[in-house]
Amino acid sequence: MKKYHCYSANFDEKTEELFKDAKFLGQGNNGVVYSLPENKVIKIFVEESVCRDEAIILAESKGSKYFPRLYKRGRFYIVREIVQGIELDKYIKKHGLNKELTANIYMLTKEFKRLRFSKIDTRCKDIMVRENNKVMIIDPKKAFKRNVNFPRHLMKGLLKLKVLDEFFSYMMEIDKKKGKEWKSKFQKYWSKEKLKAKHIKLTENDY
């Protein structure tokens, strides 16, 4: 069940005017999102630090085709370009995975590196699939704060969707060296995760 919060944001005059025609889009743990006129959305955050983090990432990725344009930032809100499309996890459930989409996801991770992100990772639901299998990021988080050198969270999502082997197969065709590297890193990571889960289960059984 999602948490529900009370939101408060001090809008400037122009944002206040746009917000009169806002339409609710959704809510997550970090805040709530509304669509605005002029192909914009406003995200109102619970925590100022989370708002600041996302605003910095969008500002640093200005001009990138993989990130929405940032129009305005307040203490607890940002106004950005709306991103049309369907979340990657929902897209895969409906249409499956294909080579072109895999290649575009790979290019997205290369863009993370170009932008000097220390976190080369994202969640499936934070990737929007657009026309012609093009992708964009929504809800970027901790790009400069966490050190993750391969998309392990993304791969966890693909594993859950039962398309991870297919993803690696396409990667071997697109960039064999990187495909082997990612597969090896994920196998090591996932083995450790399973050991952790087993240890936690054994510990719980001791009580």
Image (cartoon, helix red, strand yellow):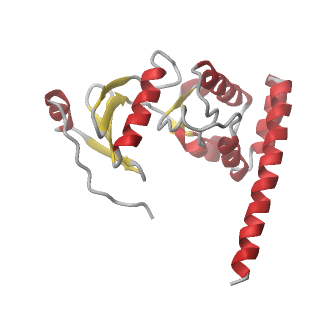
Residue 79, quarter of picture: top left
Tell me the residue at 34%/42% (across/down).
48
| Residue 4 image position (x, y, % from top left) | 34, 60
Tell me the residue at 32%/29% (across/down).
40
Residue 99, quarter of picture: top right
Seen in the image, is 6 located left or right of residue 116? left
Tell me the residue at 25%/30% (across/down).
37
Residue 12, quarter of picture: top left
Seen in the image, is 55 located left or right of residue 42? right
Residue placed farthest to the bottom in the image?
207
| Residue 143 image position (x, y, % from top left) | 54, 33
Seen in the image, is 8 located left or right of residue 168? left
- Please tell me whether residue 23 is drawn above or below residue 81 in the rendered image: below
Seen in the image, is 135 located left or right of residue 7? right
| Residue 157 image position (x, y, % from top left) | 66, 48
Residue placed farthest to the top in the image?
63
Total of numbered circles in the picture?
0
Q: Quadrant of the C terminus?
A: bottom right
Tell me the residue at 65%/27% (across/down).
109
Residue in the foreground of this view, choosing between 7 and 196? 196
| Residue 93 image position (x, y, % from top left) | 63, 47
Q: Quadrant of the N terminus?
A: bottom left
